[in-house]
Image: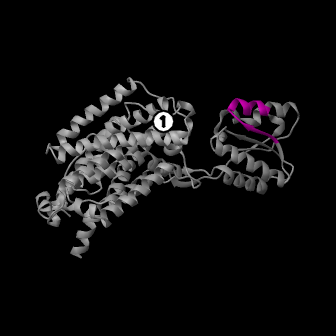
Amino acid sequence: MRQLFRTVLRDYTTLIMLLLLAAVLSVATLGSQYPTGAEAGKQIAAILAGDLAPGAGVLIVVRPLPDDRLLAAELERQLSANGFRIVRTVIGEPADAGQALRDAQARGQSLAAIAGTDATAKWPVFDNLAERFPPWGEIRMVQPQSYLWPNFLKRDNLLNIANQIAVIAIVAIGMTLVIIGGGIDLSVGSLIALAAVVCAVLVRDVFGGPQAGTLGLLAAGLGAIGLAALVGALTGTLVAYARVQPFIVTLALLSIARGWGYLQSGGATISQIPPSIKWLGSGANLLGIPNAVVLMIGLYILADLAMKRTVFGRHLYAVGGNEQAARLCGIPVQRILLLTYVLSGAFAGLGGVILCSQFQSGSPNYGRGYELGVIAAVVVGGTSLSGGSGRMFGTLQGALLIAVVQNGMNLKGLGSYSQEVVLGGVILIAALLDRAKVRWLGGRG
């Protein structure tokens, strides 16, 4: 039992916290939900078929939204098949619905029911219809039936959480490597901005701007990632060979990279980029999963395999655990440390390219404060700030935990300043848990 407790404490603390938080938010955001799209149209048609006789007149009223249009199309098909008379289908605003009612009255059409969504059923234009249109008598308002479900667990919200955290989670892969090796990288936020600006500049000035093709966009992205990796190589050289403290080096590079981004862009946002670039950052596959999320998951699988199954991974744990002992064992400590910073820079560059894709632009203001979120994800995920201990999927869990915290605060209406306070508290708690695990487990965990 003691060994089981130690294992759970070492490997699953973040996952348990994530599940508990998800459960709390599920209860806190429980509310009435309504079917949407074609499913809602089928449900409304079934209600009308049970309550009204064939031939009854039905006015369909929906908003100009994709799901509402699907509802209207399916409802039209179902009502026509069941012999109902569709007075009119309104896809618009309350004023359009009011005009449709007046037109139906002017033409002498009978109206038995108005069908639409839960939102359109609340429009004031449908108040007191019996008094305003006495010849029609009582008119039924029909909408999809509600059911209880947490807003937090809605599919769109969960996908939004995953998509919002994708950049921080990807950059956190490189940060995990650096921290396991006993270092820190404060420059990742500025490298994100520099990579986004360089990618945008290359597209604009080299590969045709708004007319750039797929190969041009790919080359621009790779160029931006390569530049960020070179900056990481500079950082690694100063840390591993010149023996400068990583905190000082990366703090200096934070300022240099941000300033370089401003110089490259002239302080302005570069937007001469074709819409096709949004495929990576905002596109989705056939299952509706964002491409950035698919990329994030794939990179974590590869990084986890690299840490567990390669010589580099074993050497990195050894270096972070005891650099002097690793050197005496013949491990190329300097090369290992250099490579971690190169990879950290490359992942930060990839994060910048993804942001450039999401916003279809490059700006030197991108990535501000991201280093805080990235380090928080790594630490909350169980990677020891002392080095030598950590898991890739723990970092992913940490990133998701932070995203869930932020999403929960958004759902409850907390402001951005309050969110910063909470995020700082999460980092502090994670650091305390890290020290507690070292003490309780008698080592690094």
Q: Image height check: is 265 above or below 278?
A: above
Name the amino acid type tagged 1: Phe
Across and down, in percent, residue 323 comes to: 14, 57
Q: Nearest the camera: 43 or 266?
A: 266
Mark 1 surroundings within 10 Å by alpha-carbon count, few (fewer than 14), some (14 through 19), many (20 or more) = some
425 falls in the magenta region? no
Figure quadrant of the N terminus: bottom left
Magenta residues (range): 87-101
Along the horizontal axis of the image, is 275 left or right of 292? right
Q: Image height check: is 401 above or below 353?
A: below
Figure quadrant of the C terminus: bottom left
Across and down, in percent, residue 158 comes to: 48, 52
Tell me which residue sits at (33%, 54%) in the image.
398
Task: Identify the residue position indicated by label 1 in the image.
Answer: 359
Residue lying farthest to the right in this orientation: 108
Which quadrant would residue 51 be assigned to in this image? bottom right
Residue 237 is at least partly visible in this image: yes
99 falls in the magenta region? yes
Q: Nearest the camera: 200 or 411?
A: 200
Q: Image height check: is 156 above or below 310?
A: above
Across and down, in percent, residue 92 comes to: 69, 34
Q: Nearest the camera: 424 or 246?
A: 246
Tell me which residue sits at (16%, 64%) in the image.
440
Across and down, in percent, residue 386 comes to: 17, 54
Tell me which residue sits at (29%, 47%) in the image.
342
